[in-house]
Amino acid sequence: MSLLKVEELSVVFRQRGREDVRAVDGVSFSVAPGETVGLVGESGCGKSVTSLAVMGLLPRRGVLVEGSIAFDGTELLTLPADKLRTLRGRDMAIVFQDPMSSLNPVVPIGVQVTEVLVRHRGLSSGEARAEAAELLRRVGIPDPARRLREYPHQLSGGMRQRALIAAALACSPRLLIADEPTTALDVTIQAQILELLKGLVADTGTALVLITHDLGVVAGMCDTVHVMYSGRIVERASRHELFASPRHPYTAGLLASVPRLDRPRGERLEPIQGSPRDTLPWSRGCAFAPRCRNRVDECARAAPELHGGSHSLRCFNPIEAKAVNR
Amino acid sequence: MLRFVVRRLALLVPILLGLSILLFLWVRALPGGPAEALLGERATPEAVERVRRLYGLDRPWYEQYFTWVGNLLRGDLGVSTRTQHPVLEELLRTFPATMELALTAMIFAVGVGIPLGYFAARRHGSWLDHLSVAGSLFGITIPVFFLGYMLKFVFAEKLGILPTDGRQDPLLDVVHPTGFYVLDGLVSGNLEAFADAFQHLILPGIALGTIPLAIVVRITRASVLDVLHEDYVRTAEAKGLKPATIRGRHVLRNAMLPIITIIGLQVGLLLGGAVLTETVFAFPGFGKFIADSIMARDYAVLQGFILFTAVVFVLVNLLVDIAYGLIDPRVRVA
């Protein structure tokens, strides 16, 4: 039984005098308790907008959200604002990309953690402080009592991200969305934060949606991976399958552009040609066609459907499947 | 924090020293002088010379300056050539009036301006937003004396619910221990005097507060719009916090910094007196008194009053800086 079930989610940004922008276009995925699901893609592919839609954090004006987002059987898209507010922070939480700008600069770290406890668990401020110190300790912040009194600018980048994670974990949410949680951090801190998130899933059975452009992060963390391009999922597979036998040319391109230690030195990385701006609207064909090496005539005529079972993809001319030995 | 305050107060000394010299020279650079102003156009040169000698104006300016500073340090600001009262006495009489008026105007401007600016930003692009932008433009451009007379016409003349001018009904039997009439009413337990003094402040307070109101609305709206797009507001939303918590702790607290700067500047300006408003409402305040003193070339009053305004201005700005430090921890470190 899945905890979060997103079906045919579409998000359209409408602005007067401009063409509508369909940032997310019929995305479906589900996450079970204790499972880690990755949403992968370049900037602008709609992965962050998907996470904001799940959390109900998109602005109401000028944004059209369609489809269905069910959390533990409750439809979130039609849920009244105050009910959604009770779920947010308590049952579902999110960790954002930039820990500096995501923390309020003029409020002490302590308050930014305790406010969740006071709001959702009705703790007194004294109880909440004790609990917050324990949370900071759990996410690996030394001397938590002192850190509670400090302000974001007095903490290092890694520590800020830990503080944000502590606030997100305060009420032991059943679903945690991590939107590029390590992008703003340096590599050693990245590893620590990922380790922290991994331990969390293992210990508490939290369902984790990990949003990233970094396939290295995916390789270490995710059970299932959804690769997005231009608002649609183009390939979906278990982590093992995806890395062993990527079948969509876009996924293959992403993998080829990751530097690897097991390749000969001096071998050049192969970037994907063009940029995400060279995109065809899905209504006219495959959005990736202008940049694709495997392009066939059909690609410019119609959009391929997502097909296949556990390893599904959206492509007319996919790469041959390799035999995957498990 | 204490060191910061002491350092800023110490900075007052060179500011006041420089300003006092400039002031001294400036009032003397005005064409004519107190003697001519007192005696009128047809005064004989001998009479003028006699009056100049009486006030010591025949001596070199630096001699006059040192005498003045010496007296100042003993708390003696001299005597007004126009009213023949000690300058200190005039200051203590007119400044509380202006301060009451300025505070009323600011309470009006801030009390209406911050909520209006906030909701205009929250409903960005709505009719309320457009109305606040248009309204604040109107508020800035409307001449104060015109607005003052219109208010008087509607609320005092036509509706008759508020007094037309002055600070207090002259028929009331009241005492003034502090010089702040509203406060005096409370202190002396005379609620009628309190209500009367307060009613006298409403119309001039609105007239004087309209420009600051328009400015506060605009700054608040712009500042809140900025903050609403910050990631930490999204974080606060993601925590499922109550709207009131998000508004107070996460939006307004950050949006306050530019608003406080503007409020400080406006308070400083208003405390310097409001000649037009005080004239329209025959309000015996600081600004009107200075304007009259300029006409009479009343050197002692001009020197004392303007120097005092400078002190007030510096103190208000010091308060603003302290408020900054209290709101934003990053300022404290710097």
Image (cartoon, coloured by chain):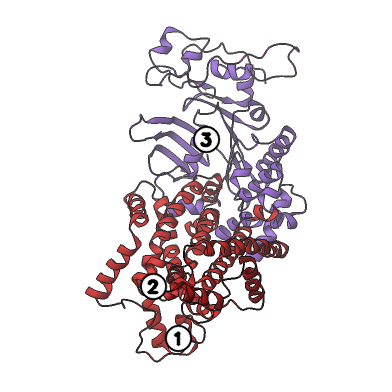
* Helix, strand or loop for disc 3: helix
Please give the chain letter of the residue carrying mark 2: B
Q: Residue at x 62, y 31 (%)?
A: A223
Q: Quadrant of the N terminus of chain B?
A: bottom right
Mark 1 vs mark 2, foreground winner is: 2
* Helix, strand or loop for disc 2: loop
Q: Which labelled disc corresponds to residue A90? A: none
Residue B12 x/y as whole percent:
65, 64
* Helix, strand or loop for disc 1: helix
Viewer can see residue B318: no
Amino acid type, label 2: Arg
Residue B124 in the image: above or below residue A26:
below
Residue marked by disc 3: A48
Residue marked by disc 2: B42
Q: Which labelled disc corresponds to residue B185? A: 1
Colour assigned to chain A in the rendering is purple
Specify whether disc 3 shares its chain with disc 1. Answer: no
Say if the magenta span includes residue A278. Answer: no
Mark 3 vs mark 1, foreground winner is: 1
